[in-house]
Image (cartoon, rainbow, N blue to C red):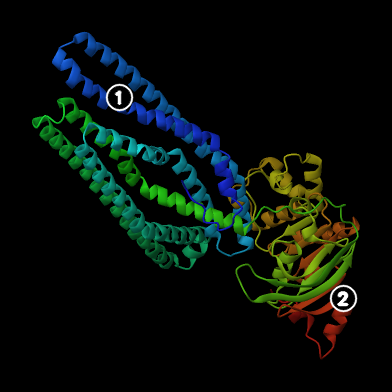
Amino acid sequence: MIRSSSPDLKPSELRRALTSFRGSYVAVAAFSGLINVLMLSGSLFMLQVYDRVLPSRSVPTLVALIVLVAVLYAFQGVLEAIRARVLTRIGAGIDETIANRVFDCVVRLPLRTRDRGEGLQALRDLDQISGFLSGPGPAALFDLPWMPLYVVICFLFHPWIGVAALIGALLLVSLTVLTDRLVRAPTKAMSGFGTKRGAIAQASARNAEVLAAMGMGARLAKSWSQANNAFREAQEQASDLTSGFGAASRILRMMLQSMVLALGAYLVIHHQATPGIIIASSILTSRALAPIELAIAHWKSFLNARQSWQRLDGLFAAFPISEGGMELPVPSSTLAVENISVVAPGGRRVVVEDIGFSLGAGSGIGVIGPSGSGKSSLARALVGVWPLMRGKIRFDGAALEQWPVDAVGRHIGYLPQDVELFAGTVGQNICRFDENASPETIIEAARAAGVHDMILHLPEGYQTEIGESGAALSAGQRQRVALARALFGKPFLVVLDEPNSNLDAAGDQALTRAIEGIKARGGIVIVVAHRPSALAALDHLLVLNGGRQQAFGLKSEIARQALQPVATPLHAVGSAG
């Protein structure tokens, strides 16, 4: 039904998921065959009434025919209900099979491209596919192969009636092909404009305070309105074409049905057919063309589902299932950064180039440099969220890619510059939503971050619901909870990007104690610093400038070099970035 766009000989993930329901589709095909055979009941009933009951005036024959056709109709109704339920289960099954895979791609997509709206499109594509497979569209497609059966029976009634039915079928097939060609372009355009419209709306919602404070709302509303108008125009064009061809198919079917009646009457007048054939052939012709009419009515849904299928197919191909490596011993001794270079997702310019250093257990390093020097880019590369263009990052000699994806995450703590918390409790956010986390380990991480007492003063302590993005907490509280999350499980490497940007003096002191605690237990901590207070507990400095490594060494040595007239002043090197 829905074709994959993958040119590879190996079946795509979506095709394999669809193939796994082969047995269910065979059952649907069997039900469709029985249903279409039972659809002949009405025509044959009318044929028998006009050609047998009326001439013979036999009431018992009429009663027998009524009982028989009632049983056949009931059986047909049961089969149609079962077919609809099976198709619904297939749609739900496809959704269940690939939903986690779609979510995985949605999460990984921002690491490859900056377009977050495209990731949300994948979720809409999943809904589109499962919705189409659960609807009446596939049933019409399963009925189409039975159309020749009705045409053949029309030929058996009389060749002229068969020719009329065949001409009508060819005309409707031509309408279907034309519908496909004309509706495809506006449907594709509608999808693109819908994604753009959604991206503008999401960005505006995330920055609602900025829009309101600086009077930018009307300008963003204009951009959204332009995208919405383009979406609406494409939607109207697709709907107009679909509804227009649908109306044409209905009128054609009704006209053909009348023409067959007239043709049957002509044949009866010339004694070439019986009166029953007039009614039976009219009903049969209408039934023969009904699947095509239904297919045209659902053609836009079919095109949407096909485009969604192709997009998901491409997305899965771009983000293959990560097999990862084997489970390795817990890292405990060294971090080696071997001449790494990094390109931002979706970009071409190298933002970090030829960075190399090594640290032993219990070390702490501050990364400083002017704005745009690549500090945050380096932090993202160190924790594996941005891929390396060149070089390696190794824990105890093992490159990051040698670890299973989920396993290496247990040994890394990361506090990004833009803190994001998730809807849930404080405790759930600290333990990274690990259902098996014990209260002791959660409290231990909170104490390490110096946030335990603050949490106890929240309305429900660790069970306090913080809302979407941690909206119930202040900026400083969110940052301190995120620090506790980074420290949960005592990770070997902890990377903190501007960890004190929203902290007061007490928060700065707690951060310093947290860094000292990481070093004391044998971990390695890397801090991207803007405010000098974040460097208090660190023993090494890495100076970046223009994405390149300008200096690396003990903090005292770097400070001594900074005081020399030929060197860059330390206060300038450590400015915002």
Q: Residue furthest left?
A: 269
Q: Residues within 10 Å of mark 2 (few under 14, many from 20)?
A: some
Please tell me which residue lies in front, 75 or 238. Answer: 75
| Image coordinates for residue 67, horizontal then vertical, percent | 29, 14
Left or right: where does residue 250 sit relative to residue 437?
Answer: left
Residue identified by numbered label 2 = 553
Residue at point 73% right, 66% down? 381
Label pair 1/2, CB-CB below 8 angstroms: no
Q: What label sits on residue 478 in the rendered view?
A: none
Residue at point 40% right, 58% down? 190
Q: Residue furthest bottom?
A: 566
Residue at point 59% right, 50% down? 11
Left or right: where does residue 195 sit relative to residue 476?
Answer: left
| Image coordinates for residue 127, horizontal then vertical, percent | 49, 46
Residue 382 visible in rendering: yes
> Which badge, 1 or 2, is on the more N-terminal residue?
1
Which kind of residue does numbered mark 1 sit on? Ser
Q: Secondary structure at mark 2?
A: strand
Position of the C terminus, as image quadrant, is bottom right
Residue identified by numbered label 1 = 41
Please tell me which residue lies in front, 318 or 536. Answer: 318
Q: Residues within 10 Å of mark 1 (few under 14, many from 20)?
A: some
Residue at point 81% right, 49% down? 489
| Image coordinates for residue 272, horizontal then vertical, percent | 14, 31
Which kind of residue does numbered mark 2 sit on? Gly
Please tell me which residue lies in front, 456 or 571. Answer: 571
Image quadrant in which you'd find residue 334: bottom right
Q: Secondary structure at mark 1?
A: helix
Image quadrant in which you'd find residue 516: bottom right
Left or right: where does residue 269 sit relative to residue 131?
Answer: left
